[in-house]
Amino acid sequence: MIKNKLSGLYLISDESLIDQSRYFDFLDDALSAKPSIFQLRIKGSPKEEILYKAKELRKITNKHDVIFIINDMADIINQIDADGLHIGKDDQNFDECRKIIGENKILGVSCYGDNDRANKFINKNADYIAIGTPYFTKTKPDRLPTSFDTMKKITSPKMTVPIFAIGGIETSNVDQVMSTGVSGVAVINGVFSYNNPREKVIEFNSILKKFK
């Protein structure tokens, strides 16, 4: 069952870091290195563009056996047969999303460094949650950092649900992040800001193997 594979490297797209002139070839190359999960995250673009990209990326993720998640667009999940949906605190309502996508699809939630929020969505049967790190991140430079102590408080009693850390994670600090007890790491700049994203995925996967 696909929900049992929620661990390891969770790669998230950033339109500003992807060569739009060779968009699908660029992502095909990165995904060929097999991150566990790939999330299409596009904010502020026309729905038609997102839908077109999502349909093509569904083919690519299927080819490489990578779980495919869409950010904050519940209504297209079943249309393109994505594996699941990710939402944050300013996105669509969790219960409404579950009704739209169904019980068999993955539904993940950002919980930042908020222990109460983590508990709330674990009790609502989220399929995974994402929490912050102490590191600076270019994607959300104004976010509040989450200390390692807070990360451990969130992970320690809750490992029945996969927990991903996100924010400023690089190959140089991923060991320290994984030592907090998370199931995996979600990465944007740590892969896509480099000249060879595929090599970065391979490097992350090599490090993460020892935590399986």
Image (spheres, helix red, strand yellow):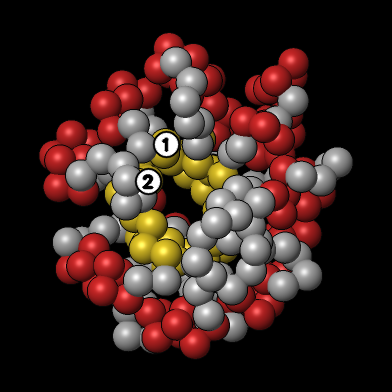
Residue at left offset 37%, top offset 23%: 80
In the displayed structure, 50 sits above or below 91; it is above
Residue that protrudes farthest toward the front in the picture: 142
Give the x, y percent position of residue 186.
56, 57
**Dividing the picture into quarters, in which one does residue 6 lie?**
bottom left
Q: Are marks 1 and 2 in contact (CB under 8 Å)?
A: yes
Query: Which is nearer the N-term, disc 1 or disc 2?
Result: 1
Please state which of residues 124 and 183 is positioned toward the viewer in this rendering: 124
Residue at left offset 32%, top offset 46%: 90
Three-letter code, disc 1: Ile
Q: Is residue 112 visible?
A: yes
In the picture, which quadrant includes the C terminus?
A: bottom right
Packing grade of label 2 (10 A; few <14, some 14-19, many >=20) is many
Answer left or right for 83 relative to 97.
right
Q: Secondary structure at mark 2?
A: strand
Calculate the distance from the C-alpha at mark 1 to the C-alpha at mark 2. Answer: 6 Å
Q: Which residue position is annotated with label 2?
A: 86
Q: Which mark is residue 70?
A: 1
Q: Which mark is residue 8?
A: none
**Dividing the picture into quarters, in which one does residue 98 lie?**
top left
In the displayed structure, 174 sits above or below 110; it is below
Give the x, y percent position of residue 47.
40, 17
Residue that protrudes farthest toward the right in the picture: 195
Three-letter code, disc 2: His
Please state which of residues 33 and 46 is positioned toward the viewer in this rendering: 46
In the displayed structure, 96 sits above or below 57; it is below
Residue at left offset 30%, top offset 69%: 118
